[in-house]
Image (cartoon, helix red, strand yellow):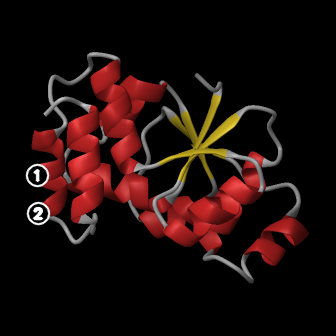
Amino acid sequence: MPKIVISDTSTLIVFHKIDEFNLLEKVYGNLITTPEIAEEFGETLPDWIQVQSVSDKKYQYFLETQIDIGEASAIALATEYNDALLLLDDLKARKLAIRLGFKISGTLGVIHKAKQLSIIDKVKPLIDKIMLTDFRIADKIIEDILKLNNE
């Protein structure tokens, strides 16, 4: 597992909304995020989430011409580490991160990892809770994740 896990806003918001915020800590231990993401999140972050500014602001600003500020700051911060995992849900940001050679996951990936690590017994109850929020997941993706987890 990567030593550095950098989270974008959407992952934090979804787990906060479904009252499963600590699942992120159980799966990854510590997370890093940026001041821009912390501000977008708008809630006090727990001690296990470190807020770190991007060193290369010019690169971040360049990325902001393609994706939103939170995702741009997360990707720019990931360039400062050798083995970072980015938690991104936005499709455009995910595609960009992959093109740049980063490892990515997202909200459903965190839930899948939690099941693999036996932190949770089933993924479906969490997906059901997510579906009660304004977070949108394509039916095909839900089918795939359920099938992947034998549910």
Q: Relative to residue 150, is residue 109 drawn left or right?
A: right
User: Of 143 and 132, which appears nearest the observer?
Assistant: 143
- Secondary element at image label 1: helix
Query: Does any portion of residue 20 appear in the rendered image?
Result: no
Name the residue carrying label 2. Answer: 132
Residue sitting nearer the eye, 39 or 88: 88
The x, y position of residue 6, in whole percent, is: 60, 44
Q: Residues within 10 Å of mark 2 (few under 14, many from 20)?
A: few
Residue 128: assigned label: 1
Residue 86 drawn above or below residue 81: below
Q: Is residue 136 above or below residue 99?
A: below
The residue drawn where x is 41% and y is 53% is 11
Residue 32 or residue 151, whichever sits in front = 151
| Marks 1,2: beta carbons within 8 A | yes
Task: Confirm whether residue 151 shows in the render.
Answer: yes
In the foreground, 99 or 61: 99
Type of the residue with mark 1: Asp
- Residue 138 lies in quadrant: bottom left
What's the mark number on residue 23? Answer: none
Residue at 40 percent of width and 52 percent of height: 12
Where is residue 95 shown, x and y percent of the image? Answer: 62, 63
For the N terminus, give its image quadrant.
Answer: top right
Q: Is residue 134 left or right of residue 2?
A: left
